[in-house]
Image (cartoon, rainbow, N blue to C red):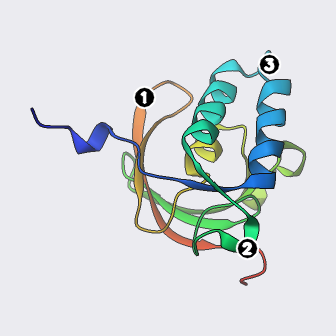
Amino acid sequence: MTTNRATRRPPIHMIDAEADTLTDLALRTSARNPEVSRQLLNEIARATIHDAAKLPAGVVTMHATVEFLDEASGTDRTIELVYPRDADIAAGRVSILTPVGAGLIGLRAGQSILWPDRDGRERKLTIVNVCNPGSR
């Protein structure tokens, strides 16, 4: 039996304090945004959790600037991943409580993930570059 590698999710990593904060956020907003909250909780549950000092280099964290390719549209985008209160799509600040935000957290440069958009269509997102706070 062969496994379809395209449908498997890549390994992800998260900072322990961010995982706790994001879990609380997802639970608090689950009534308003059930699908993204569920997706985010699932990503947190499958992540390898690290102390901030031991997080592997180049992992998408909160406030990271992320360049990624949306392979469905061929669009290369650069965004900052932020908490909902700081979101401003015109300024390139995307909330963790959006499908794209929840899909990018924990990935590293070179990784791809098949992730549903707002309409439920799966899109392949590929991380091109990650610049974390403090490494700029």
Left or right of 77 in this view: 52:
right
Q: Quadrant of residue 69?
A: bottom left
Q: Quadrant of residue 114?
A: top left
Image location of residue 86, percent across then percent down: 87, 52
Residue 85 in view, yes or no: yes
| Count of marks, rendered view | 3
Q: Earlier in the sequence, mark 1 or mark 2?
A: 2
Q: Amino acid at mark 1?
A: Arg
Q: Amino acid at mark 2?
A: Ala
Q: Earlier in the sequence, mark 2 or mark 3?
A: 3
Residue at image point 58% right, 39% down: 43
Left or right of 31 in this view: 70:
left
Residues at discs 1 and 2 in contact (Cβ within 8 Å)? no
Mark 2 — residue?
53
Q: Earlier in the sequence, mark 3 or mark 1?
A: 3
Q: Residues within 10 Å of mark 1 (few under 14, many from 20)?
A: few
Which numbered marker is on residue 32? 3
Measured in 3D between alpha carbons, the distance from the residue under mark 2 to the one under mark 3, in whole angstroms, is: 34 Å
Q: Residues within 10 Å of mark 3 (few under 14, many from 20)?
A: few
Q: Secondary structure at mark 1?
A: loop
Which numbered marker is on residue 121? 1
Q: Residue furthest top?
A: 31
Q: Relative to residue 72, is residue 63 depicted above or below? A: below
Residue 132 in view, yes or no: no
Return the residue nearer the eye: 119 or 108. Answer: 108
Q: Quadrant of residue 57?
A: bottom right
Q: Amino acid at mark 3?
A: Arg
